[in-house]
Image (tube, grey):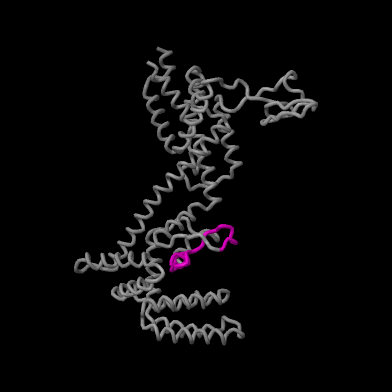
Amino acid sequence: MYLEELIEVAIGLILVYIVLSVAVMSLQEWIVSVLQKRAKDLEAILREMLAEAFQPSADSSNGGIKSMPEHSSGILEKIYGHALIQSLKKGDGKPSYIPVDKFVLALFDTVITAGSDASTIKKTLEELKSYEENVPEALQAGLLTTIDELEKKADQTRDDPIKMSKLRKEIEAFANQYTEYDIGPIYDAILHSFVPVAEEQVIQALKRGADTLTIDNIHLKHTLDDLIHQAEMYTKAGESKLVMVRANAEKWFTDTMDRASGWYKRTMHMWALTIGLVLAVIFNVDTVEIATRLWIQPTLRQSLVVAAEAYQLPEGAQGGGEVLSPTDTINRLQNSLAGLHLPIGWTFESLGPDIFNPATDRCTLFPQSRAEGQPGKDVFGVALNGACKRWANPPRDWGILTKLLGFLITGIAAMQGAPFWFDIIQKLVNVRSAGVKPEEKATK
């Protein structure tokens, strides 16, 4: 009987939800961007995936910032320093997204170089001597002496995984002494030039690289061993073991990201609910009050239906657009809500002279008792434009609960996102348009 009216009320409410949801999404994107949440969450997920979880630092001088665990291979730092991953970051920060193929290639490249045998490391150190001109002459003697010592240790390792792991740490410590002269990157570049290309050699290098993790990261070693073992066990004749290992690693990464994506979406939903509730209270967007007005005012309903038919989502409302500042977002939300001509916003009324005397009284949200003999009194209200004002016609008794319920419904609705409501409002507009329009009824 009132189907058309109900549809029009729903269209009006959903239009409000879309406008509010756009602002929620914009504020949320700004907060995420400022906090670099995506990049930090991705790093935390990868550390957990690679068994390099953060541990509290023993040094409290860093302001509570967490540091690398004491027993860690630091393999994630090497992956982040890989050229494939470096190309994904913006500015000085870390990337907020890593494609699965690039991550697996960077992981394999890092593990393969870590699995270089002692003779390859010795050959790399020998070639590193030719780059001594990058170092000031005063330091060249110490550089050559250290390289000679490392070469002798390479001879003594005989590809023993434990000795190889210790040798690598000494090489990293040596390279860190000359960070300003790029000794580390030069060493890595030379070492990469000896990376094997034949499939069996690559598989063997991956195994040796996993073995070097025996001391530092036994969990990651077991994972890599399992990936390689599965490929060797289930590869059929004529198939590539290396392709199978890579496919297993990609599935490992994808499954981890899928689980992390579900957790991230739930977190963002709670953020959206919080922001939506805050905006609903600030702008007095009460679903119950709006629905009541729409039901009793046909003209208002019709104007919102017309606005809904012409409404288009702003660019970037689907995500990935330009991040607006909070000021721009709030201004755009105010203008959009004002254009709907709905009972949105707070109405304040000035207190009369019988309640508030500006000469002696103080207008405050937190009244306090005055000392005996002190003139004037504290009056509950908000000081605006030289007057003390209060909320006009506040709800009483059960009306307060109804108001809170209206805010809660608005916050939950804003949490769903603008695209969700935009799809629904298009369907409702189409359903309404399929019926007989009011002007056609009047003509008949």
From the viewer's perspective, tell me whether residue 314 is left or right of residue 350. left
Q: Is residue 281 above or below residue 324?
A: above
Residue at the spot 30% in from the left edge and 61% down from the top edge: 248
**The stretch drawn in magenta includes residue 378:** no
Estimate the x, y position of residue 388 in percent, counting from the top left: 71, 26
Residue located at (49% from left, 20% from top): 292
Comparing 142 with 325, the one in front is: 142
- Left or right for 232, reference 57: left
88 and 379: which is toward the camera = 379
| Residue 66 included in the magenta stretch of the image | yes
Q: Residue at x 52, y 49 (%)?
A: 32
Q: Nearer the viewer, residue 394 or 187?
A: 394
Q: Position of residue 333 (x, y in %)?
A: 56, 35
Q: Which residues are magenta?
A: 59-81
The answer to whether any part of residue 358 appears in the image is no
393 over 14 or under it: above or below = above
Q: Write the residue at 51% across / 23% down.
A: 289
